[in-house]
Amino acid sequence: MRSKTFPTILLLLSVLLAPFAASAEGMSISDTVLKMPLADDVSMDDAVDSMKLRANSLNFKLVAHLPLYKELEAMGVESPPRIEIFQFCDARIALEMVRFNPDFSAYLPCRITLIEDESGKPWLVTLDLGKVIPGANLSPELLEKAELVRDNIESIMTAGANGEL
């Protein structure tokens, strides 16, 4: 039986990538993301545990987890690379951002993807909020909160990449 989550995942990916398909000339998709390789001695499972622990310590809630590689296996894809999408959120800050401008809802919740590249090297990837925030025309109070979200997401990724428990 085919899972109903796969079409949802495809829709999510198309929504996330659509703004960049018609991006400024000369900008590539790679210019819009922050990538961190996992340290050589950090397993992907350890990275996941570390991200969850760090998020919890920062009062960021893990609101969704999409193990895309398991869906691919269920569809009969042999040995798919490990691809997992983790969605983290501070609901209070999210509400303030959406009240300021509903367009922010397209960026919610914050996503971090654990992905294995063609050579088997694991990476953590997220939208580079440092490139989005400057163009958001935020009040000083919202700017401070947006920067906190950016810093927390980077902290969660760093913990995962380094296996910091």
Image (cartoon, rainbow, N blue to C red):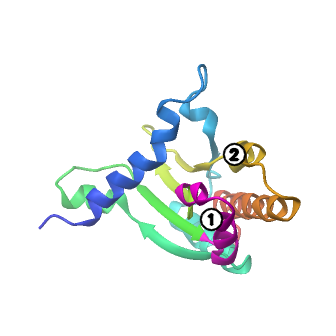
Residue 155 x, y percent position in the rendering: 74, 62
Find residue 42 and report its image quarter.
bottom right
Q: Nearer the viewer, residue 91 or 95?
A: 95
Residue 13 as seen in the image, left or right of residue 129: left
Callout 2: few (<14), some (14-19), or many (20+) C-alpha neighbours within 10 Å? Answer: few
**Which amino acid does the dot numbered 1 rest on?**
Val
Which residue is label 1 attached to? 98
Secondary structure under the numbered disc 1 in the rendered image: helix
Residue 115 x, y percent position in the rendering: 48, 50
Residue 112 x, y percent position in the rendering: 56, 58
Asked whether 96 falls inside the magenta stretch, the response is: yes
**Residues in magenta?**
89-106
Find residue 53 and report its image quarter.
bottom right
Residue 143 as seen in the image, left or right of residue 14: right
Instruction: Kindly give the residue lying farthest to the left in the view shown.
Output: 1
Asked whether 90 falls inside the magenta stretch, the response is: yes
Q: Residue at x 74, y 64 (%)?
A: 152
Viewer-nearest of labels 2 and 1?
1
Quadrant including the N terminus: bottom left
**Which amino acid does the dot numbered 2 rest on?**
Val
Q: Main secondary structure of the magenta part?
A: helix
Which residue is label 2 attached to? 132
Quadrant including the C terminus: bottom right
In the drawing, what numbered circle is on residue 13? none
- Number of residue marks: 2
Find residue 62 and report its image quarter.
bottom right
